[in-house]
Image (cartoon, grey):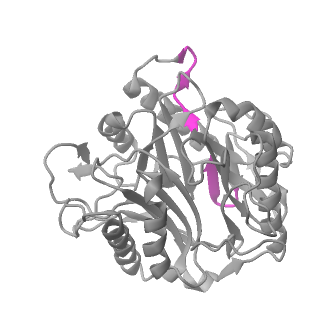
Amino acid sequence: MRGSVVASWSGFLVAGVVVVGGTITSGEPVPMLDGMVTRAGDFVYVSGVVGNVPGSSDLREGIAAQVHQAIQNVRTTLQAEGLDLSDVVSSNVYLSDTRNFQAMNEVYRTYFSDDPPTRATVEADLPDAGALVQLTMVATRPELGRRVITPSAMQSPGLPYSWGVMAGNTLFIAGATSRDPSTYEPVTGDVTTQTRRVMQNIGHVLEAAGMAYGDVVGCKVFLADGRDFRAMNQAYSSFLPTPRPVRATVRTRLMNPVFKVEVQCFAVKDPDNPRTVPGGGPGSTGSLSPALQVGDRLFLSGMLGRGSDGYAAGDFEAQTRQTLQNISGALESGGMNFDNVVDVAVWITDIRQATRVGNIVREALPDRPVTIVAAGLMSTAGLVEIQMTAEK
């Protein structure tokens, strides 16, 4: 089922950029396009919402006020789709400063006190200099059924998120860090030790949902230090059978400085095994698949702007166009195109390039919600990484 996009003019700031006539601009604040949302089959995707006053680009003052407003903006967007915050299954919180984590949690908890969605929270540079928080959420239709997964082997996180949420045949797993499952205390050590603990904790969530590592179809890996990539990769891959999930890996600050890695995954229990789809960008390496097709959904790895001649050194525009070309090849191999895309995450190495990169992405996806944040990439030559999900 092809995703439908709903947009209105009540003025949410989406992805921290100004959208005017299909073009992203910067400069003086102007009224902004409302939180664009994509409904695709069983799920609704709301991307890159910040704490601006509805009807204007003015941001609320302070972290508490911005979190309140951002969640209210998400709620309004969902209510236009006949849903509410109680239908949210997964959340990504991007903070401009880790020191705002506690204040964010205090507000977030007032909205998600009972059976909260899964969540991953990391620090990132945001496109709007005044934004302190940016939210991306996924919600499900009530009739699909929403069930919180609480593994008996794991201590409650004590924070406003659930270890797992099951919606239909899809399991959303919270960003997992290296914690002792029985005490919730951090397990320190090198990145290999921490990654193994993370993947074991993810295994507890899968088991509680009646699933296994082979059901995992996609992950996001957040690394505190890009130099740990190879060791993380080896430990991560040892838990996952082939075909391995799609994946995006970026470098960013985590909420607790003792942690070296955080892994956020989702899994699908489907009678038909996931089919690996070839395409441009990353190959089917030992650690990831370029794309996986499960039923009507196509999950893509984070793809980079590397062409046949390598990377266009230092050229954000050329790398963005090459990344989109690589993604187009994967979509085509799966019998889809950009019209089928329902969710888009863009990481760039320099937030000052958000306008330029955003405009190019909008050429391919003029009416799709897009989240753009800045983070380090695993390739020293890469400037842009884009991960998408598509659905027929």
At x 75%, y 40%, the residue is 191
- Circle count: 0
For residue 264, what is the image quadrant? Answer: bottom right
Q: Residue furthest top?
A: 309
- Residue 273 is at least partly visible in this image: no
- Residue 350 is at least partly visible in this image: yes
Work out whether residue 113 or residue 179 is closer to the camera in this orientation and state it.
Answer: 179
Q: Quadrant of the N terminus?
A: bottom right
Q: Is residue 314 above or below residue 185?
A: above
At x 48%, y 61%, the residue is 101
Could you tell me residue 376's position as x and y percent? 52, 35
Work out whether residue 176 or residue 47 is closer to the camera in this orientation and state it.
Answer: 176
- Viewed as shown, does residue 165 lie left or right of 271? left
Q: Is residue 39 above or below residue 115?
A: above
> Magenta span has 206?
no
Q: Is residue 369 above or below residue 7?
A: above
Could you tell me residue 213's position as x and y percent? 83, 57
Work out whether residue 209 or residue 280 is closer to the camera in this orientation and state it.
Answer: 209
- Viewed as shown, does residue 77 lie left or right of 143? left
Q: Which residues are magenta?
A: 294-310
Q: Quadrant of the C terminus?
A: bottom right
- Viewed as shown, does residue 391 lie left or right of 99? right
Q: Is residue 255 above or below residue 289?
A: below
Could you tell me residue 78's position as x and y percent? 41, 76
Could you tell me residue 155's position as x and y percent? 76, 73
At x 61%, y 39%, the residue is 330
- Viewed as shown, does residue 65 lie left or right of 302? left
At x 51%, y 28%, the residue is 305
